[in-house]
Structure formats: C-alpha cells, structure tokens
Amino acid sequence: MFSATRHRNMSIELTLSCDNSDLNRALLNGEVEPRGIDLTTTVTYPPRRHRRFFRQQEFDICEVCLASYVSSRTNPEAYPFTAIPVFPSRKFRHSFFYKHADADVDGPADLAGKSVGVQSWQTAANVWMRGIAQERYGLDLETVDWYRRREDDVPVELPERFDIDPVPGSQGGDAIEEPRDMKALLFEGELDAVMDPSGSLFRAVAAADEVEFMFDDPIATERQYYTDTGIHPPMHTVAIRDEILEENPWVAVSVYDAFREARDRALEWNTRPSYNMSLTWAHLHLLEQNELIGDRAWEYGLSEATRRELETFVGYAHDQGLIPSEYAPETLFVDSTLDV
C-alpha cells in the first residue's frame, strides 16, 4: 500500500487521498506529477476516507463519494470544496445486489414489504441500486423496510416517507464498525436482501446456499442495462478545497490533467492483460468491455454521455430525499474544467 508519499515538483504543497486503483496509480507512485504542485499522496479507502474529508476536511484533494458530494452542494459554506469532472470509480451495480434464498424474492419489485440492508442511505452505489430498482423494475421505495449500517457522511434530514432504521442489533449513529454485520444478518435471514457496495458477498453465492444474486445472470443484466441506457454509473468524483481554488485557480485544471494522464497510462497498461493482470481471462473481459462500452468506459470530463449519467444520478438523489432540488451537472464542477 502506498502511504504519505511526497512527489516534489515546485510551487504549492497539497495533499491528495484516493483509492490505490490502477487509474490513480501513476499519481500515487509519482510517475505523473500535476503541474505546479508538490503533491503528498495518501491511500485511504471508503468509507473512512469520505468521512475524514466531509467531516474534518482533512485533505486538500480527495476522491469522494458522488452521493455525499451532491448532498454537500446544498450547504457550500459547511462543505467548502468543489469537484472536477474526474470519475475514478464506475461500476454497474446489478451484481452487487443479493437476496436470501428463502426470501420469496424473484426480482427487485418483490422487495415491497421486505427488509433490505444498505451501507448508508447516501452511499452512491445504493443510490444507483435503489434508483434502478424503482425506475426499471417498478419497486416503490416507500414500501421497503430499509436498514442502514451507518449514518451518512453529509447529514441530511431524510423524508419520513422512507422507513429507515439502523441494522438490527446495531447502535446506529456514526459507527463504521457495527456490532452485527449485514452479511451475517442476510445469512441468518434477518434481512431479505442487501445492497452491498463492496461486492464482498459474491464469494458467498458460490460457497453457501443461503445467499443468491438478485438477478439470475447479473452480467447479462448489466450488459443489457448499458445497451438500453448508455450509462456506466459513476460512483466517485474528485473534490478540491475552495480555499485552494480561490488562491490558485489554475490548480483545478492541473489536477484534472494529472488524473487524466494517470488514467491514460493505466488504460495503456491494460492493453497487455496477459502480462499485467492476475486474471486468467482478463484479455477476454477487456475485449467484451471494449465491444460494449468502447473508449468511454472510464471517461473523464463533461461529455453528453457523462452529463446524461449525472442527470440520472441527481434525479435519483432528489427522488430519494438526499437533495431538495435537482442540479444541472455543470454546477457540480469547477468552471475551468468544463471544457478541457
């Protein structure tokens, strides 16, 4: 793991925290240096990284949960930072949706009256999964008994029309480590389904009879979703403290360019999957991805396709009570990065 690594360039000193993903790695190891910035990088992971940024504003630049960032825009004085259109995490989420084998659930529409666990109401993956369940499968979100593992990183007063409680046996509140794990509750049948953003339950599907994917063929379902919508759901974006942007407006484009170059190096590296990845069928998966999504699989910037994705996400966030009104995608990002 990379930790607190200094990359000397010149001019101002800034800190960055992000995932140790292939898309970010050239920034973390110093192969890519943002212009005019002496960057100190630290690898931290959700949900702790997001909480440290939103609650303590601990880093100058941070990879953040898209849902928490969108929620924070309702109170910019309390959350003084602005994002750039960089999306280091995108994932289809149908394959992260699990059910108990005895729950009498054939699909999302059958979750009415059932108990469903989520990481938090504000987790981007859960916003996408709930929105898809409602829009494409007809689930009324107000008919579900929702259980969340922890409070949201950006506190929001959620509408009473949603039935949301702490997971059974937990103390609720801000705890990230709960007394009882949602996976155990699903195995024991205390939860009928779980929307698991980490994907840690996928091994259980193969190893245990109690847990099943929500969809019989989640990969085919996700491929069809992209064919129908053109959406490759963004989960994270990158935010910069406003104080830095006010004093050094050029920082936004410098950081954007650095993330984009790091991404480009990762994608070039991935064109040689037989040598660079410890996945036996990596070359075939890469071929499938390219055939379906093409060059925009890991798109940065505010293209028409990304704009459509963000409009969909913001609409879901509004429907689910996270924001009082919908925002135009342009208002989420630093102006100077909209046309780069």
Image (cartoon, helix red, strand yellow):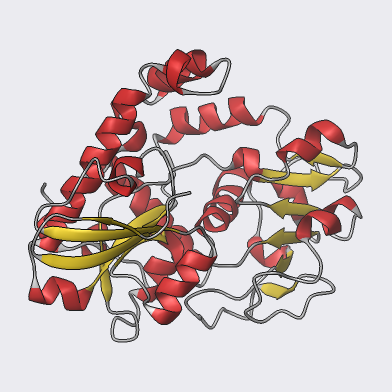
Residue at 17% in and 63% down:
334
Q: Is residue 285 left or right of residue 130?
A: left
**Vertical placement of 195 versus 169: above or below?**
above
**Vertical placement of 94 versus 252: above or below?**
above
Q: In this view, does 94 lie to the left or right of 66?
A: right
**Vertical placement of 307 versus 67: above or below?**
above
Task: Choose between 43 and 145: the one closer to the eye.
Answer: 43
| Percent x, y of residue 125 | 54, 53
Residue at 62% in and 79% down:
174
| Percent x, y of residue 225 | 51, 33
Q: How many labels does the image show?
A: 0
Residue at 91% in and 55% down:
188
**Vertical placement of 303 versus 54: above or below?**
above
Which quadrant holds residue 263?
top left
Task: Choose between 311 and 210: the one closer to the eye.
Answer: 210
Which quadrant holds residue 97?
top right
| Percent x, y of residue 118 | 67, 61
| Percent x, y of residue 154 | 47, 77
Can the viewer see residue 143 in this picture? Answer: yes
Residue at 8% in and 70% down:
248
Task: Choose between 79 and 136: the one closer to the eye.
Answer: 79
Which quadrant holds residue 143?
bottom right
Can the viewer see residue 323 in this picture? Answer: no
Q: In this view, does 127 lie to the left or right of 258?
A: right
